[in-house]
Image (tube, grey):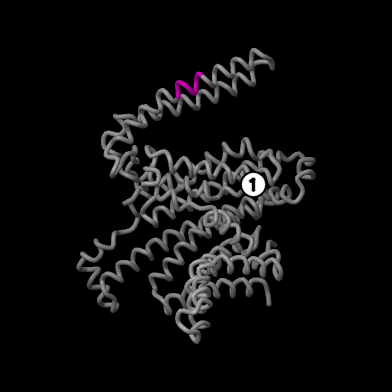
């Protein structure tokens, strides 16, 4: 079987599984799986750029996805009345003062000769800057968080169209990636992994604890969306008439319409990013990145700036993850920092890339769609299977209860089993790199 035919059949298989879900469960469930699969595919492309193109082991995907979600709040949410006047400008001033302290410390480190004098100046700058920063920051934060804390307590956003938040999420994640890359990309790959994982946890901790930014663990709900609201469609006589003509009730039709609207938007973004990634892969830049990945020493001997190129692709991959994070928050309609877990937003994305085929963009998309389908469906299938197996056992049996309770672990077991099978029989993934 030729490679194109095999790849086509693999994509058709995943599409068939989603269609089977539609007929066996509901179209709502199938389209929801499709939408989250498309978002996961975008995240997988970002990770594939970093690992498949450049060999960068980034275990901080969760942090960049969360920053994308934060961008939706800062760009699209309505501003909190009175927040900027109460302390918003003071918070911005304090953050600028903190940045100025860091810049001053770097300037002194570069310009002054080593010695006791430089050390004393650095200590004075850092202590003085910290005291000034906290002196301005704390009272302004308290003023913002005191504004209607039950429903707000944060500065809010800019009330811009939510679609603008998607590229903004990419820019926010790219900025954070640049700061991280300037310090962490000189480390060995295992140290880079530890550093990115730790920084991702720091980002989540900031989102959870800085209520003035995005309400912390109290969450931001009611975010704007780029598609109509279901209730508006249900109150539209022309929509109700069209739904009746298709044999659908207005509630079901409105839900499907909204979810399909998201599907179209997500598919457009995915196709654009996939096309750009393919063009990059086939370009001289892409060949250079793979040469650096395969042998950094040889590439450096040929005059390539390895650290600079690593920084480029680290920023690009992180920006794509930020875009996906903004899309996911838009789909949810809320930002919930407590839901960002490494298992879902880092390691599951890595499983998608490895199973699909690292270094191959189409493999990353296939792996994302397949693994997300299994992630959603394995647990209910496992519960059904356990119920069938134990159907002949007496009610109240300890073994029966244990087997049914163990169905909750089928998800993790299946992910590990799929990963092991792929690594054993197709170690380069389902669609290997050419």
Q: Residues within 10 Å of mark 1 (few under 14, many from 20)?
A: some
Please name whichever residue, 405 or 82, is drawn nearer the observer in this view of the structure. Answer: 405
Vertical relation: 227 (above or below) 285: below
**Quadrant in the picture for residue 296:** top right
Please name whichever residue, 73 or 220, is drawn nearer the observer in this view of the structure. Answer: 220
> Is residue 286 a member of the stretch shown in magenta?
no
Residue extending furthest toward the top: 117
Q: How many numbered circles does the render carry?
A: 1
The residue positioned 45% from the left and 75% from the top of the image is 21
Q: Is residue 350 left or right of residue 268?
A: right
The residue positioned 20% from the left and 68% from the top of the image is 237
x, y percentage for residue 135? 41, 23
Vertical relation: 225 (above or below) 242: above
x, y percentage for residue 222? 31, 51
Query: Which stretch appears magenta?
Result: 128-133
The residue positioned 53% from the left and 72% from the top of the image is 14
**Quadrant in the picture for residue 354:** bottom right
Vertical relation: 182 (above or below) 58: above
| Helix, strand or loop status at disc 1 | helix
Q: Is residue 371 left or right of residue 85?
A: right
Q: Please name the predominant secondary structure of the magenta segment in the image.
A: helix
Q: Which residue is mark 1?
A: 193
Q: Considering the image in quadrants, where does the C terminus appear? A: bottom right
Q: Is residue 127 left or right of residue 144?
A: right
x, y percentage for residue 20? 47, 78
Q: Considering the image in quadrants, where does the N terminus appear? A: bottom right
Vertical relation: 85 (above or below) 201: above
x, y percentage for residue 158? 34, 40
């Amino acid at each position: 079987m030729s490679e194109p035919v095999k790849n086509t059949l693999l994509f058709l298989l995943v599409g068939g599984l989603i269609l089977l879900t539609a007929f066996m469960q509901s179209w709502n469930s199938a389209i929801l799986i499709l939408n989250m699969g498309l978002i996961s595919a975008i995240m997988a492309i970002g990770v594939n750029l970093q690992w498949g193109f450049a060999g960068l082991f980034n275990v901080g995907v969760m942090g960049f996805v969360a920053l994308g979600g934060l961008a939706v709040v800062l760009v699209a949410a309505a501003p909190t009345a009175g927040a900027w006047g109460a302390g918003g400008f003071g918070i911005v001033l304090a953050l600028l003062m903190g940045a100025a302290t860091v810049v001053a410390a770097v300037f002194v480190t570069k310009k002054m000769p080593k010695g006791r004098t430089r050390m004393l100046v650095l200590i004075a700058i850092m202590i003085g800057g910290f005291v000034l920063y906290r002196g301005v920051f704390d009272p302004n934060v308290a003023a913002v968080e005191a504004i209607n804390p039950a429903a707000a307590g944060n500065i809010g956003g800019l009330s811009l169209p939510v679609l603008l938040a998607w590229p903004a999420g990419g820019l926010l994640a790219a900025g954070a990636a640049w700061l991280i890359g300037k310090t962490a990309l000189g480390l060995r790959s295992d140290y880079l992994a530890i550093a990115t994982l730790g920084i991702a946890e720091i980002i989540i901790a900031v989102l959870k604890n800085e209520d003035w930014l995005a309400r912390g663990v109290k969450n931001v709900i009611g975010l704007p969306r780029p598609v109509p609201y279901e209730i508006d469609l249900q109150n539209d006589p022309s929509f109700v008439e069209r739904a009746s003509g298709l044999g659908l009730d207005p509630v079901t039709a409105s839900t499907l319409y909204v979810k399909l609207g998201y599907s179209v938007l997500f598919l457009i973004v995915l196709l654009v990013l996939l096309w750009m990634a393919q063009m990059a892969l086939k370009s001289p830049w892409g060949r250079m990145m793979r040469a650096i990945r395969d042998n950094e020493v040889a590439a450096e001997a040929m005059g390539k700036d390895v650290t600079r190129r690593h920084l480029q692709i680290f920023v690009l991959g992180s920006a794509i993850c930020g875009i996906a994070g903004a899309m996911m928050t838009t789909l949810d309609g809320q930002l919930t920092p407590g839901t960002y877990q490494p298992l879902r937003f880092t390691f599951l994305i890595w499983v998608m890339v490895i199973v699909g085929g690292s270094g191959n963009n189409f493999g990353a998309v296939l792996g994302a769609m397949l693994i997300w389908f299994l992630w959603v469906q394995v647990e209910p299938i496992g519960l059904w299977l356990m119920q069938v197996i134990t159907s002949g056992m007496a009610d109240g049996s300890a073994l029966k209860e244990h087997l049914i309770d163990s169905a909750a672990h089928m998800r993790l077991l299946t992910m590990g089993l799929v990963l092991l099978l792929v690594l054993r029989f197709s170690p380069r993934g389902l669609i290997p790199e050419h």
